[in-house]
Structures are given as C-alpha cells and as structure tokens.
Image (spheres, rainbow, N blue to C red):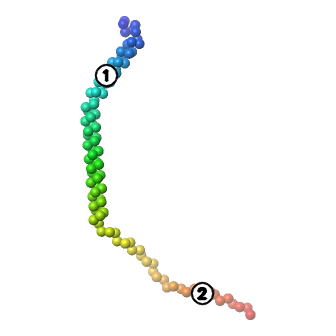
Amino acid sequence: MAKNENPIQQEEEDLIAKRKEITKYYKDNIPHLKTQLQYEELLRDIEKTRAERMQAQMFIAKSSAAPPAPEVKPEAKAQPEVKRTLKKAESND
C-alpha cells in the first residue's frame, strides 16, 4: 500500500526511472550514430570528388575543342531591284 499512499512521489520516481532509461538508450546508440555520421561524411566526400572530376573533364573538353564555326545564315535569293516611279497625272487642259 506504500505506492497508493503517495501517488505524487511514485510519479516522480517513474519519471526519474524513465529519464534514466532514455539516457541509457541514447548513450548506447551514440557509437552507432557516430559510425553513421562517418559513413555519411564519406559519401559526401565521394560525391563532391566525383562532381569536381566531372567539372574538370568538361573544362578540358571545352578548352581542347575547336572553336565553333561561325554560323552561316542562308541568304535570301537576290531579287532584282525595281526602280519605282511616280505616276504621271493626267491633265485636263
């Protein structure tokens, strides 16, 4: 009956026990999380190195490629120039 006599104290003891359990859980998982962090950092470094290598390859390819030829526009057929004159007005004399 000791538990029923003081429910507030029992709740505090339960909270303390739960906190200890949670703290132990986190501490037990820290080595795993550190390993995961190291794994993620390695993946990041690999992706960064790949991107840098690809960028360098693209730069080399662009710099060693021949300059682009000037674009040739198809010319319209030359039409003979028509000389335009004014119409002569008819006079009513």
Q: How crowded is mark 1: few (under 14 residues within 10 Å), some or many (20 or more)?
A: few
In the rendering, at what x and y percent does residue 30 appear?
27, 30
Looking at this view, is 81 or 38 the one in front?
38
**Residue projecting furthest to the top:** 1
In the rendering, at what x and y percent does residue 86 appear?
62, 86
In the rendering, at what x and y percent does residue 70 appear?
37, 72
Q: How crowded is mark 2: few (under 14 residues within 10 Å), some or many (20 or more)?
A: few
> Under tag 2, what secondary structure?
loop
- Looking at the image, residue 27 lies above or below residue 55: above
- Mark 2 or 1 closer to N-term? 1
Q: Residue at x 28, y 48 (%)?
A: 47
Q: Quadrant of residue 67?
A: bottom left
Q: Residue at x 40, y 11 (%)?
A: 7
Measured Cα–Cα span from mark 2 to mark 1: 105 Å
Q: Quadrant of the N terminus?
A: top left
Looking at this view, is 28 or 63 the one in front?
63
Residue denoted by label 2: 85
**Residue projecting furthest to the bottom:** 93
In the rendering, at what x and y percent does residue 43 appear?
27, 44
User: In the rendering, which numbered label is found on residue 91?
Assistant: none
- Looking at the image, residue 80 lies above or below residue 20: below
Q: Residue at x 29, y 52 (%)?
A: 51
Q: Quadrant of residue 68?
A: bottom left
Task: Judge from the rendering whether residue 23 lies leftward or rightward of residue 5; answer left or right.
Answer: left
> Under tag 1, what secondary structure?
helix
Residue denoted by label 1: 21
- Looking at the image, residue 4 lies above or below residue 45: above
Under mark 1, the amino acid is Glu
Under mark 2, the amino acid is Thr
Q: Are marks 2 and 1 in contact (CB under 8 Å)?
A: no
